[in-house]
Image: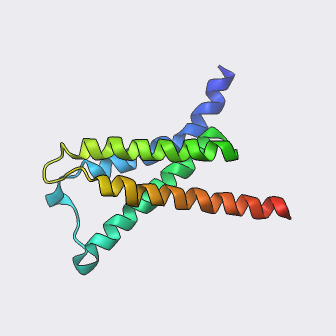
Amino acid sequence: MNKIITIVPRWLPAFFMMVIIFIFSSQPSKDLPSFADWDYVIKKMGHSVGYGLLALSYLYFLGYDVKRVWLAWGMAVAFSAADEFHQSFVPGRHASITDVLVFDNLGALAALFLVYISRSVRWSR
């Protein structure tokens, strides 16, 4: 029971991010906002930021360890692939391998890299 009490709070940020991503990807295309000339850039940056935060929340759940960085990244990319599949069933939306391999993947990698660098700098002091 004590283990569950310590695991649940550490899992909440990841669960929250997965719910937020799922809600956004469940919206039909006609219900999505348009950002005029910046639409593509803003939406793809949203992918990168969202999956960067998801990867960080996975790392928080797993406990920071250099070996677990890759697991957190893999979990974020796996969720991205599953969410793109889910999105293929939403009216007006489609699954995009580019979103998974470029925007979501690189967002997760960039966020984890920044944490790795910041931790490395702190440890060297």
Q: Where is residue 4 in the image (x, y as percent from the top left)?
A: 61, 25
Quadrant of residue 38 within the rendered picture: bottom left
Identify the residue at horizontal 61%, vertical 32% (top origin): 7
Q: In this view, does 35 lie to the left or right of 122?
A: left
Identify the residue at horizontal 63%, vertical 28% (top origin): 5
Identify the residue at horizontal 35%, vertical 44% (top origin): 81
In the displayed structure, 113 sits above or below 60; it is below
Image quarter in which the C terminus is found: bottom right
Along the line of sight, the residue nearer the viewer: 38 or 73: 73
Q: In this view, does 4 lie to the left or right of 41?
A: right
Q: Position of residue 121 (x, y in %)?
A: 77, 64
Identify the residue at horizontal 28%, vertical 70% (top origin): 40
Q: Where is residue 31 in the image (x, y as percent from the top left)?
A: 18, 59
Residue 64 in view of the camera: no
Residue at the top extreme of this rendering: 1
Q: In this view, does 94 lie to the left or right of 118?
A: left
Q: Position of residue 36 (x, y in %)?
A: 22, 78
